[in-house]
Amino acid sequence: MTAAGDPCDTLLVTGAAGFIGKHLLAHLAGSPNRPKHVIGLDLRGGTSTPDIEWLDCDLTNEASVREALGRVRPDGVVHLAGLTGGKHGLGAYFRANVLACANVLAASTSLDRPPRILVVGSAAMYGVTEGDYVVVDEARPLVGTTPYGVSKILQEKWALLYSQVRSLPVVCVRPFNIMGPGQPESLVPAAFLRQVADVVAGRARDVLCGNLETQRDFLDVRDVAAAMWDLMTSGVDVEGQVFNIASGEPLGIREILDACIALGGRDVPVRQDPARLRKVDVPVIVGDATKLRRTAGWRPSIPWQQSLADMWRDIRPRISPPN
């Protein structure tokens, strides 16, 4: 990477066609210090334009990754690619989240000028915590108990090992609950909005939910993209470090559901689904992003109500037939 605040010549974004990736590309397009060249690497592909070049690469194939990075020779890499939700086997999470990242790290060390690599983890790495109201900072032990959470722990530990042993300029982030346009509809609040739209369209009778009494830390995906780029263009003091990306404010799941129903413009019956209840559900968990604010000067700027409204405009036309 170049000096703090200066754009890098070439940025590689893995998983660029995904939820966060699309918003990061949009953020870069409007950034005054955008890279001269942006390469999106994603098996889902994309159409190359003067602003972005797309490459197909199987990140679990070490030889393919070495060939891709040797061709691109990026100054920076934002590693977003990986496997998130769904019911996948343990091996699938390991390959997509651990092995793929390990291949990117190894290929980067073989370059004459190793790039700065932003490795994207998750708040799921913290796992289930104890107590009623938990504020989680980066020093909290990682006790992830899901295949996804454990795979992200291994991914981050491997990245930090490369930073320590091979002096690779790695930065790790742990985003908390992300919302915004394009959020997968299996996650709250997109799942609520999808169900509300179905009820409004007459295709469903009610909205199914789990525990509505919990509170979590939500922030807009566009703020997350801004935080990532702020870290990529910060000084060398961020390298080898881990940063939470969080709002620091609790938001009730019931409050989100009520706001989703209000966007639908009519009363919507709500029914609790036992299958959506968790055995252990800490009432309140929020992230502490003090380190990120002090280091990069980042603060979230998009209110959650605006995020929901933008998501509703994005979701409803694809679900409800025009009147």
Image (cartoon, rainbow, N blue to C red):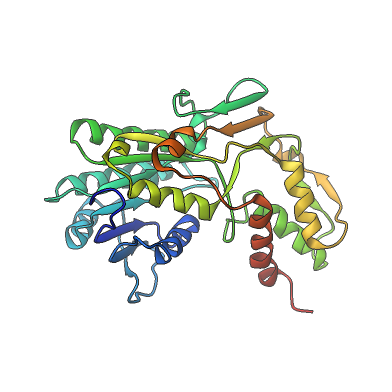
Q: Is residue 149 above or below residue 304?
A: above
The answer to which quarter of the image holds residue 121 is top left
Q: Nearer the viewer, residue 19 or 34?
A: 34
Q: Residue furthest left?
A: 112
Relative image position of residue 318 (x, y in whole percent): 66, 71
Relative image position of residue 35 (x, y in whole percent): 30, 62
Res 84 seen here: yes
Write the residue at 80% across / 68% down: 201
Q: Nearer the viewer, residue 201 or 13?
A: 13
Write the residue at 22% across / 40% down: 168
Q: Is residue 307 above or below residue 87?
A: below
Image check: 116 left or right of 86? left
Q: Residue furthest bottom?
A: 323
Image check: 237 left or right of 209? left
Number of numbered tags placed on the structure image: 0
Q: Nearer the viewer, residue 244 or 67?
A: 244
Q: Quadrant of the C terminus?
A: bottom right
Q: Nearer the viewer, residue 319 or 216?
A: 216
The answer to which quarter of the image holds residue 203 is bottom right
Relative image position of residue 289 (x, y in whole percent): 50, 35
Q: Is residue 158 above or below residue 85?
A: above
Write the residue at 34% across / 74% down: 48
